[in-house]
Image (cartoon, rainbow, N blue to C red):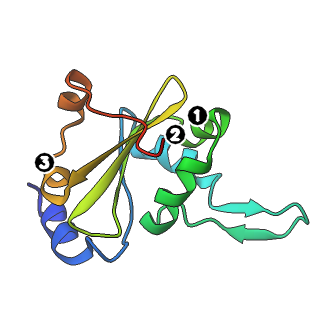
Amino acid sequence: MSSFNDWYFEKGWGDSWGVLVYADHDLKKLVKHFQKFLTVNTEDGEAYYFRFYDPRVLRVFLPTCDQTQLKDFFGPVNYLICEDEDSAFAFVFSLDNGVLLTEKITRNEVMTFNPAEKKKRSSFRNFWS
């Protein structure tokens, strides 16, 4: 495991420090993609910050999205992982033909998450249904 991963799981996991993003694209493309989600407007035109990178927000937000919103939000992303309320667990989110798939895994499984392996054996399901 990298020194960043060691630091993140030791210091930040369980404190809603962020969301793990797995994609087949470089960081520049991901930054550009996610920038458009940093602020949202209400129907009254008021702008608010949207903390999609906060696990407490993401795990509530994604299940409320329709297929178009999910495709737009995921864009180039293959997997989003965020800690559960119980930091011993996490949710792995992905899309399958516009349908949100969710898998609940342990913290240890997050630490060894391998997107290539995930594609080979999919145990994902629509967790919220």
Q: Residue 21: give x, y in percent of width and height.
A: 37, 48
Compared with 115, 112 (above or below) is below
Amino acid type of the residue tagged 3 in the rendering:
Thr
Nearer to the camera, 120 or 50: 120
Residue at screen point 62% across, 65% down:
50
- For residue 74, the mark is 2
Side (left or right) of 120 relative to 48:
left
- Badge 1 crowding class, 10 Å Cα cut-off, few under 14, some 14 to 19, many 20 or more, is some
Amino acid type of the residue tagged 2 in the rendering:
Phe
Circle nearer the N terminus (3, 2): 2
Compared with 35, 23 (above or below) is above
Q: Are marks 1 and 2 in contact (CB under 8 Å)?
A: yes
Nearer to the camera, 35 or 15: 15
Amino acid type of the residue tagged 1 in the rendering:
Lys
Q: CA distance from mark 1 to mark 3?
A: 26 Å
Q: Residue 106: give x, y in percent of width and height.
A: 18, 55
Seen as rendered, the residue at the extreme left is: 1
Residue at screen point 65% across, 51% down:
36
Seen as rendered, the residue at the extreme right is: 44
- Badge 2 crowding class, 10 Å Cα cut-off, few under 14, some 14 to 19, many 20 or more, is many
Element type at mark 1 = helix
Q: In this figure, what is the number of numbered marks?
A: 3
Residue at screen point 56% across, 56% down:
61
Q: Residue 97: give x, y in percent of width and height.
A: 51, 22
Element type at mark 3 = loop
Q: Are marks 3 and 2 in contact (CB under 8 Å)?
A: no
| Residue of label 1 | 71
Element type at mark 2 = helix
| Residue of label 3 | 112
Q: CA distance from mark 3 to mark 2?
A: 22 Å
Q: CA distance from mark 1 to mark 2?
A: 5 Å
